[in-house]
Image (cartoon, rainbow, N blue to C red):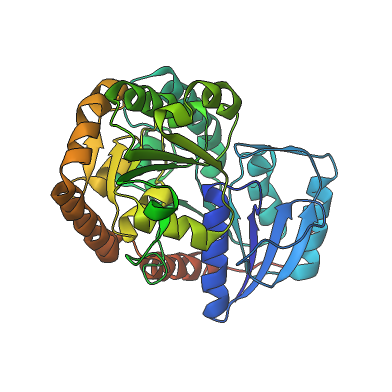
Amino acid sequence: MHIAWLGKKSPFCGNVTYGREVTNSLLDLNYQVSFLHFASEETNPDNWPDCAEVFLPYIYRSQAYILPSLKSTKVLVEALKELKPDLVHASLTLSPLDFRLPEICESLNIPLVATFHPPFDSKIRNFKSSTQLITYQLHAPFLANYDKVIIFSNAQRDLFVKLGVPAYKLAVIPNGVDTDKYCPGESSVKTDFKADRLFVYLGRIATEKNVEALLKAWKYANLGPGCKLLIVGNGPLTTSLEPFYGEEYNILWLGSIADEEKRIQILRGADAFILPSLVEGLSISLLEAMACGTACVATDAGADGEVLEGAGIVLNTQGVTTQLKTLLPLLRDHPELTDILGKKGRQRVVEKYTLKQNINQLEIVYKQVSMRKSYPLSTYR
């Protein structure tokens, strides 16, 4: 089967990781994959599959959304006509093209699957979650025209059903992680950073990630020079936060780390991974940390609380700073607690959130949508 994958390779975010891991797995299973993405001709990032590429023109591109150029639709249609894929899988990048894809693929008689990544909170508890709800409300009428929409949790499915997307068009397939690659192991990261206890945040430095709540709690807790907090990632709030929460508080800003092995080494060496988000989908970074045997703390935004319940510490999205002020000293003083949580997190991922399980379910979706009746190729107007 030939899959035309519409996604992104940069800038780095969870959508990028998802596209890399899934397309690599599909190629390993002898699928033919063509990768269509908004980019100029650029060097292929590390660990990306070697497959046919189509570059879609754009005006603006960020981690959160993409503004395509007026020519992008024409380029996409011509590419699909030439490639003649059996199926289009759109790992949605939040661009206006998302709304046109059903019409384009219907006119070309190509089955269309989408993975919908935008974060959410099933309860309207803060301004950020309410703005994300608007994203869901805007997309729902168009997603109802896709052949299948992949989402990450039952709560996300219930939200879309309330917004009018037929339940039969929704497939709950949680993100998965390669548990052979992301696994417990030796790491020199504590020695490298001269730390007795090491805590890590890995993700975007953006409003919805609520990183400042963690930074405030860390500063207040004053855990001592033997405890270090690594901030791995970049984003629009970096320049406004880093000057006020620096090395004088044992906070080290490492920026984005593209090297996957370095990220794995950090997760293996950390005592705790903390994700204070206000909204989430299903954090791949959280799954990676759990798979590496790192004790995990996350809010119950999106599907993260569902994943971590009973295998980590789940926070409410309201009052994150207050909760962490109490929790951080406990994580410092009780290594037996972090050891137990790390083992439980690893076990949870191995049982329910492996990449292999994800791909198996994805193949079922592909077979389902490919069985629809074929019609002669028509011309898109």
Q: Is residue 272 above or below residue 258?
A: above
Between residues 311 and 243, which one lies in front from this camera angle? 243
- Residue drawn 50% across the image and 46% down it: 116
Quarter of the picture holding the N terminus: bottom right
Q: Is residue 3 above or below residue 242?
A: below
Q: Is residue 99 above or below residue 14?
A: above
- Residue drawn 31% across the image and 27% down it: 317
Between residues 177 and 225, which one lies in front from this camera angle? 225
The number of callouts visible is 0
Q: Is residue 7 above or below residue 315?
A: below
Residue 319, percent from left and from top: 28, 20
**Quadrant location of residue 120?**
top left
Relative side of 158 to 11, left or right: left
Residue 302, percent from left and from top: 36, 38
**Quadrant location of residue 259?**
bottom right
Relative side of 333 to 129, left or right: left
Between residues 205 and 64, which one lies in front from this camera angle? 205
Residue 145, percent from left and from top: 56, 46
State whether residue 174 appears in this view.
Answer: no
Relative side of 303 to 169, left or right: left
State whether residue 305 appears in this view.
Answer: yes
**Quadrant location of residue 266?**
bottom left
Q: Residue furthest bottom?
A: 30
- Residue drawn 58% across the image and 76% down it: 27
Relative side of 58 to 190, left or right: right
Residue 176, percent from left and from top: 40, 60
